[in-house]
Amino acid sequence: MPVNNMEVFNTYYRSEIGPIEIVGTEEGIISVSFIEHPGSPIIDVPECIRQCVSQLDQYFLGKRLEFDLRLLMHGTDFQKKVWEALFTIPYGQTRSYGEIAKMTGRNKAFRAVGNANNKNKIAIIIPCHRVIGSNGKLIGYAAGLWRKQWLLEHEKRVMLKKGISS
């Protein structure tokens, strides 16, 4: 399936919270998604996918607090604005849907922020798991709330271990 006449590649990553499919081209990462039934990891993939696997390893080992990957984000201008705002949420911290809406300049668009998060195809790296309800409750995560909770707890454990306050 070519994207803009570029060949698309994929591989699979086995995380502590389930298998992840990584899809990309020579130009960058298109998606990072939790899946139910992974194939065998594919080794002959572009460098950006190998970097993604390596950086996910580092993240799950608690050695990486930020990702440095070329991402190919496909969405509306508003969705991209929301996703860019997500990058500003520090590791180990959370923001509400309303706070993200304010960051986009659309103060009352918290539902639209939720919809944009739901359309995020690059899980973990675009950290939509760090967005919570205004009441502090975990709501809305396409890969399951239990994964969202695990990711947030993982980041808090890493912060404590490194002696970094949130």
Image (spheres, rainbow, N blue to C red):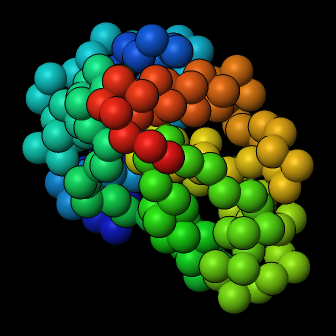
Q: Specify the farthest residue to the bottom.
A: 105
The image shows residue 37, relative to residue 96, as above or below, that is: above
Picture layout, residue 89 above or below residue 150: below
- In this orientation, does residue 133 appear? yes
For residue 35, what is the image quadrant?
Answer: top right
Using residue 147 as the reference point, say whether residue 57 is left or right of it: left
Q: Is residue 158 left or right of residue 129?
A: left
Asked if residue 126 shows in the view, the reply is no
**Location of residue 13 with respect to 159 vertically, above or below:** above
Give the residue at x 45% y 12%: 16
Q: Residue 57's spot in the image, x, y percent?
A: 26, 25
Quarter of image, res 46: top left
Q: Quadrant of residue 102?
A: bottom right
Left or right: where does residue 5 sit relative to residue 104? left
Q: Which residue corresponds to the image point at 52% horizontal and 15% vertical from the top-left?
A: 17
Residue 70: percent from the left, percent from the top? 25, 59
Residue in front for this viewpoint, 152 or 1:
152
Please provide percent x and percent y for residue 11. Answer: 30, 27
Considering depth in this image, is 137 or 31 the residue closer to the camera?
A: 137
Count of numbered tags: 0
Question: At x 34% / y 59%, what residue is drawn?
Answer: 71
The residue at 66%/27% (across/down) is 149
Residue 164 location (% of width, % of height) = 37, 40
